[in-house]
Amino acid sequence: MNNVGYKAVLLFTRGSQSMERKNEDTSLLLKHLQEGDERAFRTLFEEFYASLCLFATRYLGDREEAADVVQETFLKYWNKHTDFDDYRKIKSFLYVVVRHACLNLLRDRELRSRIPEEWIEDSEQEFRNQVMEEEVHRIFNHAIDKLPLQMRMVINLSLDGLKNSEIAEKMNLSEGTVHAYKKEAYKKLRISLKDYYYLLPFLLFISR
């Protein structure tokens, strides 16, 4: 998804509540995490790993270093897994620890003078907005990844800014077929994202 697409989403997410999985699923996962269940930990890892790596890379500019920070953060969580009685606190812990670790690394590299001041002293609201953006990326990518291959390709090209005629030429399809794929994808995504009502306006953006 290109920056225009993501910015369109963010216009409708500012001030919204945190995006979480269904309550019953969250409660069950939290219970297993508190019990030290490794499969539950793997589920948590798979859910947040990619977005945390992207988050860390924005600070460090190095994907490998960012991945190391994220892995160490998950180990820190695992050593404290019995302390968390709320799934939202786990997510907050992961993002806060990653952020602090990144800033510490930058200081250790004696590059603090080159760190944008707002990264060090940004407001709590700005930090929440950063986390919200990563959540938007994660949720939409997950929903789009569940679409059939051809339909997924059409949507991704559309999000990259291509017109129906350009998508049709690139994929060797008729414009009518492209339009049909987008219409069907819109229906499927609307079902997948039904719990995230404040993201639905974005579906109008991709259904054009």
Image: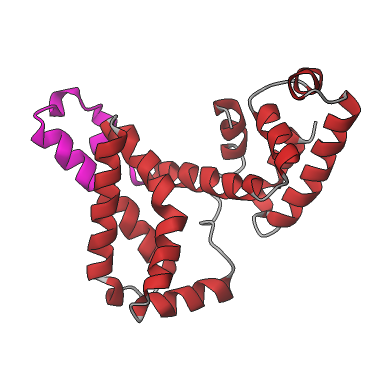
Tell me where the magenta segment starts and ends, as one range.
Answer: 99-124
Is 11 left, or right, of 130 in this rendering? right
The question of residue 114 being in magenta is answered with yes
32 to 123, vertically: above or below: below
In percent of the image, x 64 and y 55: which residue is there? 196
> Is residue 73 on the magenta stretch?
no
Query: In the picture, which quadrant includes the N terminus?
Result: top right
Residue 172 position, x and y percent, is 80, 22
Q: Position of residue 60 (x, y in %)?
A: 26, 33
Q: Quadrant of the C terminus?
A: top right
Q: Out of 123 and 165, give the one closest to the viewer.
A: 165
Residue at 43 percent of width and 80 percent of height? 31
Q: Position of residue 56 (x, y in %)?
A: 32, 40
What secondary structure is the magenta-colored segment mainly? helix
Residue located at (87% from left, 32% from top):
177
Is residue 32 among the parts visible in the rendering? yes
